[in-house]
Image (spheres, rainbow, N blue to C red):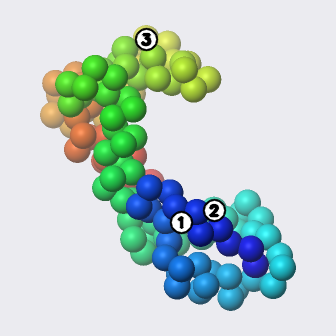
Amino acid sequence: AVVSTQSTGGGAPTEEELSSIAQHYPPESYLSFDDFLEVVENHRKNHGFMAEELREAFGVFDVDGDGEIDATELIDILTQVGDPLSQSEAEQLVRESDLDGDGMINYVEFVAMTVKP
């Protein structure tokens, strides 16, 4: 199977892990999207999310760099990526993720929101 070794910012599988994955697929074949999702899920179960990747993702949403994400920042970023939210939808997402009740999403709450099934 053709398996890329391109780095993804510290979260990429090792060469040994890639070889192990490739052994489960016929030579000269490509992974289907479903197979790829299975590989990603297995990697997540075995290794979890990488802290660096989560920190970078949090930084994208924390536009003003104050260490917290508010509804306006959610609206701005999600609109930029083509998934716009209304003010009420953004406020609901903040309420669902806001564990300490301060009306903002801090890093710990962001991680909890990101990794919940």
Of the image marks 3 and 2, the number of the one nearer the N terminus: 2
Quadrant of the rendered image containing residue 49: bottom left
Q: Please tell me whether residue 115 is drawn above or below residue 94 in the rendered image.
A: below
Quadrant of the rendered image containing residue 98: top left
Q: Residue at x 54, y 80 (%)?
A: 15
Q: Secondary structure at mark 1?
A: helix
Instruction: Identify the residue at the far top of this view.
Output: 87
Cβ atoms at labels 3 and 2 below 8 Å apart: no
Q: Residue at x 37, y 19 (%)?
A: 73
Q: Secondary structure at mark 2?
A: helix
Which of the labelled discs sits on residue 87, or is there none?
A: 3
* Disc 3/disc 1 C-alpha distance (Å): 32 Å
Residue marked by disc 1: 41
Q: Please tell me whether residue 111 is drawn above or below residue 49 in the rendered image.
A: above
Three-letter code for the amino acid on which mark 2 is drawn: Leu
Residue 20 or 92: which is nearer the viewer? Answer: 20
Q: Position of residue 74 (x, y in %)?
A: 41, 23
Cβ atoms at labels 1 and 2 below 8 Å apart: yes
Horizontally, residue 2 falls left or right of residue 10, namely right
Q: Position of residue 113 (x, y in %)?
A: 36, 43
Residue 86, can we see it? yes
* Disc 3/disc 2 C-alpha distance (Å): 32 Å
Of the image marks 3 and 1, the number of the one nearer the N terminus: 1
Q: Secondary structure at mark 3?
A: helix
Q: Position of residue 84 (x, y in %)?
A: 55, 19
Three-letter code for the amino acid on which mark 1 is drawn: Glu
Instruction: Identify the residue at the far right of this view.
Output: 28
How busy is the neighbourhood of tag 2: few (under 14 within 10 Å), some, or many (20 plus)? few
Q: Residue at x 49, y 76 (%)?
A: 14
Residue marked by disc 2: 37
